[in-house]
Image: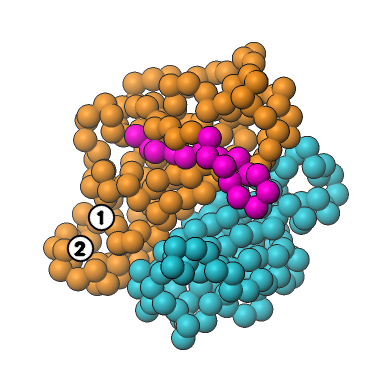
């Protein structure tokens, strides 16, 4: 499978993070164009790929994870704890035949992202 | 190095054609040892730095988990959010120990707000001679964080490779 997918994990609790809004954008003519916003399901994934393989193009993409609202709704987390609120990940697709899985692991004080599989 | 990573690098080699194919998979599977130039990664001569007891400040530590060295010579653009845009504050380059000679912000310059530190990953790894796709998966990396109390000390370690990164509020 080619295209782009993601997975949001609550690394503080070792669970998927449901209900996190993700804004997906693509770089066009030197500016970010918002393509769509999706929300993670109970498994921390999106019901459909962020970008289906058939629509994959070489280019630069951006995922903005609205972790802030998710964290604030968690018991035991106060706003003062939140150091990483809405992390943004920008990455390039250099080969449309490959799949790009871009997970986001978050806690109030940390975030991690990488090219996953 | 696990099998999956080998597979990915092999695929990348195919995608790039001749140049990347010239290197054997075994060579691609490991980062080449970085040069000994002190301006580049590879200088592991300093002990950890404790900042306990110091005044309000924002400090950075870039750590290259690809080479297992400080992230030396990383260009970083610091900006603060104002409305819908980020206003540039300064551009810094990390020293041989992966830190900046001076704090990014200190005392009165440390203000409450939403910040972005834009790290020039692609330029950094190009200098180390790493064999990567062009454009690389990560080029200009935005590290966004919030300073909520200007009377505190904020340490920002960024652990990075060409394929991922992690950052956190350190100490």
Magenta stretch holds residue A96: no
Q: Is residue A22 left or right of residue A58?
A: right
Residue B20, which numbered label? Answer: 2
Distance between the alpha carbons at the discs numbered 2 and 1? 7 Å
Nearest the viewer among A14 and B19 is: B19
Dots 2, 1 in contact, CB < 8 A: yes
Q: Is residue B157 visible in this depiction of the protein?
A: no
Chain letter tied to cyan: A
Q: Quadrant of residue A70?
A: bottom right
In this rendering, the answer to whether A101 lies above or below B49 is below
What residue did someone put label 1 on?
B131
Nearest the viewer among A37 and B17 is: A37
Helix, strand or loop for disc 2: helix
Badge 2 density bin: few <14, some 14–19, many ≥20, Cα 10 Å: some
Give the magenta-colored segment's residue range: B73-89
Q: Quadrant of residue B80?
A: top right
């Amino acid at each position: 499978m080619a295209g782009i997918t993601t997975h949001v994990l609550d690394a503080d609790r070792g669970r998927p993070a449901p209900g996190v809004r993700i804004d997906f954008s693509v770089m066009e003519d030197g500016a970010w164009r918002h393509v769509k916003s999706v929300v993670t399901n109970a498994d921390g994934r999106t019901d459909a790929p962020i970008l289906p393989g058939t629509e994959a193009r070489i280019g630069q993409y951006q995922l903005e994870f609205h972790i802030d609202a998710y964290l604030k709704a968690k018991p035991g987390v106060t706003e003062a704890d939140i150091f990483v609120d809405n992390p943004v990940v920008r990455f390039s697709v250099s080969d449309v035949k490959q799949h790009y899985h871009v997970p986001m692991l978050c806690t109030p004080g940390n975030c991690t992202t990488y090219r996953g599989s | 190095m696990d099998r999956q990573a080998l597979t990915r690098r092999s695929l990348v080699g195919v995608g790039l054609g001749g140049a990347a194919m010239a290197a054997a998979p075994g060579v691609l599977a490991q980062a080449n040892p970085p040069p000994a130039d002190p301006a580049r990664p590879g200088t592991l001569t300093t002990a950890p730095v404790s900042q306990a007891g110091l005044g309000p400040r924002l400090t950075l530590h870039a750590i290259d988990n690809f080479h297992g060295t400080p992230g030396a010579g990383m260009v970083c653009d610091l900006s603060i959010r104002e409305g819908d845009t980020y206003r540039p504050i300064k551009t810094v380059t990390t020293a041989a120990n992966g830190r900046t000679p001076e704090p990014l912000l200190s005392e009165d310059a440390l203000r409450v707000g939403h910040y972005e530190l834009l790290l020039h990953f692609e330029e950094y790894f190009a200098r180390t001679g790493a064999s990567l796709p062009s454009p690389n998966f990560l080029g200009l990396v935005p590290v966004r964080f919030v300073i909520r109390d200007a009377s505190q000390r904020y340490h920002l370690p960024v652990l990075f490779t060409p394929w991922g990164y992690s950052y956190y509020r350190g100490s």
